[in-house]
Amino acid sequence: MIRIQARTEPSSLMKVASPLLAITLTLIFGCILFSAIGKSPTQALHVLLIAPLADSYNIGEMFVKMGPLLLCAVGLSLCYRANMWNIGAEGQLLAGALGGSAVALYFIDSESSFALPMTLLAGIISGMLWAAMPTFLKLKYNSNLILTTIMFNYIALYLLIWAVHGPLRDPEGFGFPESALFSDNTLLPVLFESSRIHLGIVFALISGVIGWFILSKTHLGFQIRVFGADEPAARYAGFSGKKLSWLVMLFAGALAGLAGVSETTGPIGQLVPNVSPGYGYSAIIVAYLGRLHPLGAILAAVFMAVLYMGGDLAQIEMGIPVAVVSMFQGVLLFFLLACDFFINNRLAFTNQATN
């Protein structure tokens, strides 16, 4: 007889093994999935995981996709460590892209040296404001943070679509739903010639270090960890739950907003409806794959960025539908959560007496 038994203390081995086991199970599932749709599993996994790192240009594109994933994941890691279940990184990213783009278009004919900093600041503030609204509803009216942040994702998306069809649409763009191209003084500098790697990846890496420093080296980080692990104990110790909730949510919103404005001022160079292919949602997987640790999120963001690159190549080279690639990412999160279950639980085998 097999039954679930709670562990007396969390398994240190499973904390380390869980992401590796989840990736292994996902690859096995991928082989079955690709075989079911008539594709070679070996070739499909090669295109998904190896081909994106085959040359310097693809590696550069991997870093371009890694930036927004990491920025969102670092903020989400702090939220989840504080038991604030923010699912709104996608909406906060889109809000940052929209707010930053509006300022970039204001400076389109300006040579001001403040154009880029003001654009980035507008994106950060927009992301913070978008995170502030569901946080206020949660703390004031005890609304469900998961539901409100998800709903705000759709509000941000349709607000952005309205903007590129209306007030921010390029008057000389032949009616296409996109803004005018930004001026050079509002674009993030490219770090390497013959690539699209821009300053946004530096912001992302710095955010990972800052997130690690806050969590591991500051009293604030200690409060976040205690509050997430045992809220009654944190309140007994005098830690302010409202203050911590505001801090982690605004921090996550700021980073997601920076991710959004870095996309429009970086590789895209204008505001378009498809600013994000779902970076904010994928960042949830990145955060969990990185064990809710900002430095772990760096490695997880690399892996997820490779999957994004591989997904594009799989569509081009093998004709694999984008839905299959998205399913591959979703299954990874499923297996990760399933494996995490065994950090605090284990299977117990017992002999059932027979009469």
Image (cartoon, rainbow, N blue to C red):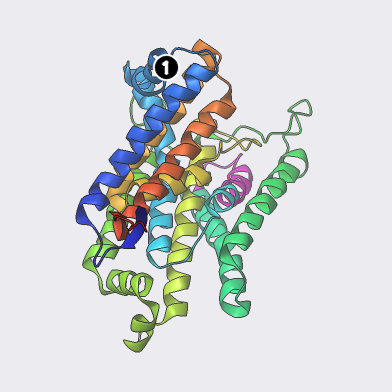
Is residue 30 among what the camera can see?
yes
Viewer-closest of 3 and 64: 3
Q: Secondary structure at mark 1?
A: helix
Is residue 193 among what the camera can see?
no
Residue at position x 61%, y 55% in the image: 150
The image quarter in which residue 252 lies: bottom left
The stretch in magenta equals: 95-115
* Direction from residue 38 to residue 228 in the image, left or right: left
* Direction from residue 13 to residue 335 in the image, left or right: right
Give the percent coordinates (x, y) of residue 97: 57, 46
The image quarter in which residue 217 lies: bottom left
Q: Residue furthest front?
A: 355
The answer to whether residue 161 is magenta is no
* Direction from residue 154 to residue 36 in the image, left or right: left
Give the percent coordinates (x, y) of residue 88: 56, 55
Picture layout, residue 155 above or below residue 333: below
Question: What secondary structure do most residues of the magenta stretch adopt?
Answer: helix
Picture layout, residue 271 above or below residue 256: above
From the image, which quarter does the C terminus lie in?
bottom left
Graded by Cα atoms within 10 Å as few (under 14), some (14 to 19) or many (20 or more), the crowding at tag 1 reads some
Viewer-closest of 192 and 326: 326
Give the percent coordinates (x, y) of residue 176: 74, 29
Viewer-closest of 129 and 297: 297
Viewer-closest of 6 and 136: 6
Picture layout, residue 14 above or below residue 144: above
The amino acid marked with disc number 1 is Pro
Residue at position x 33%, y 82% in the image: 233
Residue at position x 47%, y 38% in the image: 331
Give the percent coordinates (x, y) of residue 104: 58, 44
Residue pointed to by mark 1: 41
